[in-house]
Image: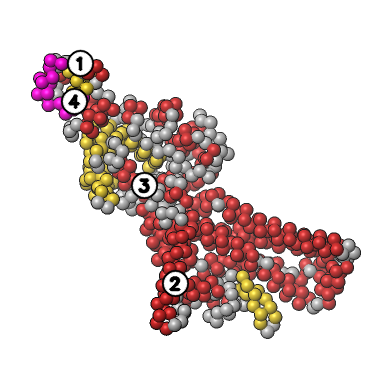
Amino acid sequence: MSSIISARGLTKRYGRTVAVDNIDIDIPSGRIVGLIGPNGAGKTTALKAILGLATYDGELSVLGKNPSTQRAALMEEVCFIADVAVLPRWIRVHQLIEVTEKLHPGFSRERCMKYLGKTKVRLDHKVKQLSKGMVTLLHLAIVSAIDAKLLVLDEPTLGLDIIHRKDFHTRLLDDYLDEDRTILITTHQVEEVEHILTDLIFIKDGRIALESTMEDVQERFYAVEVEPDKISEARRLAPFYETRVRGGQHQFMYDGVDRDTLQNLGDTHIPRVADLFVAIMNGGES
Amino acid sequence: MNSLLALIKREFWENKGAIRTTPLVIGAFHVAGILMAVFTMSHFDADGYTTKMAIAELGKMSPEMRSEILYQGGLASSAFFAVVMSFVVFFYLLGALYDDRKDRSILFWKSLPASDTLTIASKLLTAMVLIPLAFLAVFILTHIVTAIIISITIALSDGNPWTLFIAESSPLKVWSMVAASWLATSIWSLPMFGWLLLVSSFAPRVPLLFATLPPLILTVLQGWIEFLQSFSLQGNLGSLIKDWFFNAPVIISAEISEEGAGPALGVPLTGDFDHAVTIANMLDRLFSMQMLAGLGVAAVFLVAAHWFRRRATES
């Protein structure tokens, strides 16, 4: 069992719509994986299958368990934050801590209090009295205090302002992360997490469009601002995506072409994840 | 076991208003009613003449008679608690597997290592045990406060509350009979509880309609077919539910027999069971063929509710 998550032919249909189409995923321990795709690409569906919240076809093993039949056992080692504000609104913070402590064998009240101490959340607050940002930090504090092997985050910062988003990511790195822990995160704000990711999975129309480590991404893909007189030469090297950037310049995106060759065509650099994502979604499969 | 208790505690936190406040309000009404009666009486009758007359009448009765009246009265005073409690349980169960789907907090609850079986068990036990115990506690409290008020009134009217009243009352007998009656009713009501949990587990919205419309429509259809066939209106789901309620082992109505009037189990309009308030009559119901069939129905509903719960995410 080297993989934390291992899927073979994972498929989920809603009536005639195929939300997840026969995908294979392997996520080893200790990675921070960004699962990135446009709206409706099947990200949340895939996560629900992984968390045992939905039925599926195909083989799926999470920490060696079958999520669809062993959800309760699996949740002893997996934590999950689904976008913002899924904490029950009627509950008080101390009640939330008590119920988590009693249900979760790996929960440490002491650590939770330590993390909460860094926020403005008080124990007698009701969740409905807290702002979205505070609820998210409360949820993160609880999750960080659980000794879990896998943390699944589904758009955890949706609807938060930039200050709370940054705060969330800092806390995630400081409080949650260590070498034994794996994080699977979906987000639209790719640029804010790209520096913490170790792996990328792009998903498009229910299929995997890219599965790669960040190191490989940085060695494989180049973006070139092609000089106007070299455009036809550049096209012969089979870019998978062409776009116009500011100033009318042509930007070409290449997969697996030698950097020295590309540098003759113009300014060559490693693309940002967000740009690569747009290129792969709009261009061909890489 | 600890997880189950934690989940039941969670139910109490979420439904404090229904489980704790509601019986307290009923108890307060009871006490206020008695106080008002006492004050009204003393307002019109400053010398306490009427009260003294009543005490004198009470004194003429045999101790056995006094004891019986106090016992029957104690049982009867539980009926109003039982009626309100049944509403509380009904709406509690309708929301039990519905509310967290509606406000999306199911995604949090499902992220905790508690199985769906345990979750459903905690909700069922809340309805069957926790809510009756909460109502029982307040009923007992109300009973004690009432007894104190009556004792003071008797004492102020120069009567002896001990010989006239306290020595003849058997509160433990009343409380244990009411407790037995309510817990037996929880078991008797399992088919209904199962149905409400099932509706709660799948209803996309307005669970109240999903809970009441199908039995209503089925009853009307059955009644119609029956009427076309035999010009009678018997043997449909509605009359089955009605009989089920009439046979319930809950102290809710009165029966007039040769020995006089007294509280009764259920509504004494069916001949299936004896309606006198005794433990034997409660057990008679729990060990009947009806109950056995009812448990089968409840099991089907609960398995179906579990099936839906396992697949449920936010709706």
Which is more N-terminal, label 4 or label 1?
A: 4
Identify the secondary structure beneath mark 4: strand
Q: Amino acid at mark 3?
A: Leu
Q: CA distance from mark 3 to mark 2?
A: 45 Å
Placement of A36 over or under A233, stated as above or below: below
Determine whether, in the image, residue B280 is placed left or right of residue A211: right
Identify residue type, mark 2: Thr
Circle 2 residue? B219
Tell me which numbered mark, 1 or 3, is placed earlier along the sequence: 3
The answer for how far apart the CA atoms under marks 2 and 4 are is 68 Å
Where is mark 3, residue-wise?
Answer: A74
State the separation of the CA atoms marked 1 and 4.
Answer: 15 Å
Q: Is residue B259 left or right of residue B102?
A: right
Q: Is residue B129 visible?
A: no
Q: Nearer the viewer, mark 1 or mark 3?
A: 1
Image position, residue B259 (x, y; %): 69, 82
Q: In the drawing, what numbered circle is on residue B109?
A: none
User: Which amino acid, by three-letter code, is at mark 4?
Assistant: Glu
Residue range in magenta is A228-243
Q: Is residue A167 left or right of residue B151?
A: left
